[in-house]
Image (cartoon, helix red, strand yellow):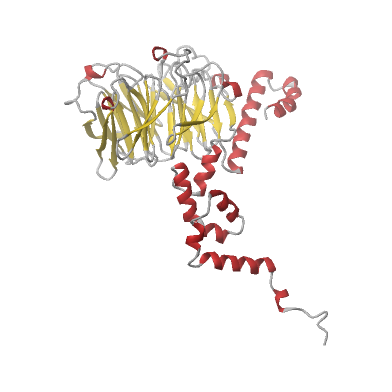
Amino acid sequence: MSLAGQKHPRDDLDQSEETMIGLYDLYAGDLSEKMLSYASIDDLCKFDILSKKFQALAESRWKELVYEETGMKNGKADWVKHKSFLSEPISVELVDEADYGYGTTFAGTPRVTTNGSIVVMTTDDTSDNLEERTYPSSESEVICVRDGYSLNFSRLVSSPIRSWMLAICGRIGSEIIIASNCIQVAAIRGNDTQIISREGLPQPGNGFPLLGCETHLIICIDNCLKLYRVETDTAAEELLSFKQSVVATRQNGPQPQDVFDVPISISWGSDKSSFVYCHDTEISIWSLDVANDTLDKVKFIDVAGDDEDIQIDNVALGDDYIIGSSTDRDIHVWDRYTGEKLPNVLCDIEEEDDRLSPDDIIRELHLWCHGHILISSSHLGNKLCIWNVKSGVLLKEHSLELDELPDGNDLTDLAFLPHLNGFLLVTSHLTTFIAFPTNKRQESMAKSMKRREERIKRVLLFGVGEDFHAHSSASDSDSW
């Protein structure tokens, strides 16, 4: 009997589906852990193509390899982020609010901070820009607020004091904007304002360093940390209630005269449950107990014990490292848990380079750390440096020569925007967003911002008329 034309039982199966089930059963068995233990990141990338079942099977191996390579703990998602920082970013120069009649956005040493939902930035005082402004008091100063997702200009907030440092605390949608100078701290939410004044002599410099989160505000005054809780009761008379004052250094109590001209820095860890504080040659890590409204010191490092010439002027706290920039133009690294100083000293200025001596340094570096990746500003103008902290290697620079950052200004502050995986950079005259997209959505958002800002510039340059329309199509193509 001929079998020609007869249907074989296997024809009822999708061949690729049958093969896939067989492979998955093989890897999902007892042998899978041992087999995957030999897989490299390149192997896992190929493995991911097979199916979602295989992706789940390799999740633990992803986390293991990515942590070994980058110090990041979220597996494949963090590997994508790590690779994005080494690729060419999308640069967006934000239009100065002065073009809308709000006055120059930045002056002196501008600052920027974000809670992810909103971005707040310091502005100049109003005395030279009163003509087209309207807000409660001509004696006040304004703080610029942008949307944290699109970076669209949102509003101006009237500040009763000249603002040098900024923080944000409170719940999203009900944020309290905090501004400080060398005498006072102002808390602002809507039409409500609370002033916290410093007793005794004013502290010189750029104001009291601040940290804010959803529940608390931390203020560095002299060598003390002062903790305030955000009041959620709308009937409360004050926005913030004082909870604790603790001496942050090893000096015996607050001594204002000892902190004149001494750099003080403070920075959150990634989860905002701990922070690092630096006072001259002393570095300490603190934990915030939200439930009990207390601060506790968990680690102390005497920098002078490592090198008497080191004076730390800014710090960042990573998952495994403490990073500090110093007045000798270097970046120093300590193990977060042991306090041991790593041998690698990071510096993007060669020893024989005479373009900048320590005496020429007028402002600290600005730092952001995730895993082994450190992103810093530079003493050589407006430039971003991307480092591997563990190896001490400078992985990449985004510099003036690449025309990615505005020319002629040093960075005075930077803020990381997690939703966009990018950094907002501020200088005395310009605001630039540098995006490192990890997916198509973030890439589309960054490019949309770029088109929006270019369109605004053309409107301001040519007006809404024939000249603008004549140049719009050409400018759209040039902006890419």
Q: Identify the residue at the far bottom of this view.
A: 1
Total marks shown come to 0
Q: Which residue is drawn at 77% across and 79% down?
A: 7
Q: In which quarter of the image is the N terminus?
A: bottom right
Q: Is residue 237 visible?
A: no
Dividing the picture into quadrants, the one containing residue 218 is top left
209 vs 35: above or below: above
Q: Where is residue 302 in the image (x, y as percent from the top left)?
A: 26, 29
Q: Position of residue 293 (x, y in %)?
A: 25, 40
- In terms of depth relative to the viewer, which is nearer, 18 or 249? 18
- In terms of depth relative to the viewer, which is nearer, 368 or 306? 306
- In terms of depth relative to the viewer, which is nearer, 156 or 419? 419
Q: In this view, does 125 lie to the left or right of 339?
A: right
Q: Is residue 469 visible?
A: yes
Q: Is residue 420 left or right of residue 253?
A: right
Q: Residue at x 69, y 69 (%)?
A: 14
Q: Where is residue 282 in the image (x, y as percent from the top left)?
A: 27, 27
Q: Position of residue 374 (x, y in %)?
A: 45, 33
Dividing the picture into quadrants, the one containing residue 434 is top right
Q: Identify the residue at the far left of this view.
A: 252
Q: In which quarter of the image is the C terminus?
A: top right
Dividing the picture into quadrants, the one containing residue 182 is top left
428 vs 17: above or below: above
